[in-house]
Image: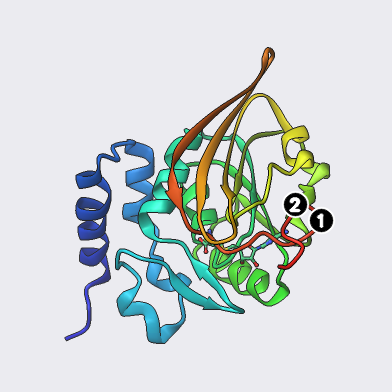
Amino acid sequence: MALDYTQARQRMVQEQLLERGLHDPLVLDAMRQVPRHLFVEEHLRDRAYEDHPLPIGEDQTISQPYMIAHMAAVLKLAPGEQVLEVGTGSGYLTAILAEQGAEVYSVEIIPSLASRARQTLHELGYGNVEVHVGDGSLGWQAHAPFDAVVIGAAAPGLPRPLLDQLRMGGRLVVPMGEEDLQSLVCIWKEPGGIHEEYCGECRFVKLRGEHGWESA
Ligand code: SAH
């Protein structure tokens, strides 16, 4: 019998998010709405709601559902806010952010992933999203300043242009640390300086580009 994706999604929200203490209603609603199975290749669709990342080609992955929801919850988006996403990947997090009413500017360095994500997001009807091919570690100056910035790949340090393109009072989320294990760092840009908080351990693919890993 074919897997009921709607049911699989409700179960994912219950078991992987609610039962782990994630209660942000906007994020939970978005996770209930966005058809994650359409962001992976056809042969992986039945595994899309499992509790781990999955390959999306080009040695990259779609993050685990919990990690996506956790990042989105930290950003605490309000409808109409402008968000910069670095590393579109499959476009799944892009959709979760767009579903919350944000205007999402997403930069992906691998052209084939960018075009597939663009097509998926278009087919699902997300009009409040722009995907651009380039080095996202440099940000997207034309649309700055952003209310929020989310980096979907592990950075060796905080890329300066991304902090510069964040508005005062804005939030930034970035996995930072070693190449094989990082902390999810949540940053608030305030008039008195930068406020940082560690929001748990994580494992992401490496950030490339000018402010990424030299070896990536
Ligand atoms: N959140 C995504 C997963 C992102 S995986 C999802 O939901 O599918 C990380 C992505 O970052 C990969 O697609 C990788 O190609 C991209 N990436 C790495 N370095 C980058 C850079 N400097 N600029 C833009 N994208 C980058």
Q: Amino acid at mark 1?
A: Glu
Return the residue nearer the eye: 210 or 78.
210
Q: Can you tell me whether the CB of the residue at mark 1 lies under 8 Å from the nearest atom of ligand 1?
A: yes
Of circles 2 and 1, the one toward us is 1
C-alpha separation, residue under disc 2 versus residue under disc 1: 6 Å
Q: Is residue 103 left or right of residue 34?
A: right
Residue 181, above or below 162 = below
Nearer the N terminus, badge 2 or badge 1? 2
Is 102 left or right of 45, judged from the image as shown?
right
Label 2 belongs to which residue?
A: 137
Q: Mark number for residue 210?
A: 1
Instruction: Name the colouring of the figure.
Output: rainbow
Percent position (x, y) of residue 185? 54, 39
Residue 151 in the image: above or below residue 46 = above
Residue at disc 2, CB closer than 8 Å to ligand 1: yes
SS for tag 2?
helix
Compared with 105, 143 (above or below) is above
Please name the residue shown 68% across and 77% down the image: 112
Considering the numbered disc 1 on the image, is that residue within a helix, a strand or a loop? loop
- Is 117 in front, or is 79? 117
Q: Position of residue 113 (x, y in %)?
A: 63, 73
Q: Residue at x 49, y 64 (%)?
A: 124
Name the kind of residue labelled 2 in the image: Ser
Residue occupying image coordinates x 30% and y 78%: 46
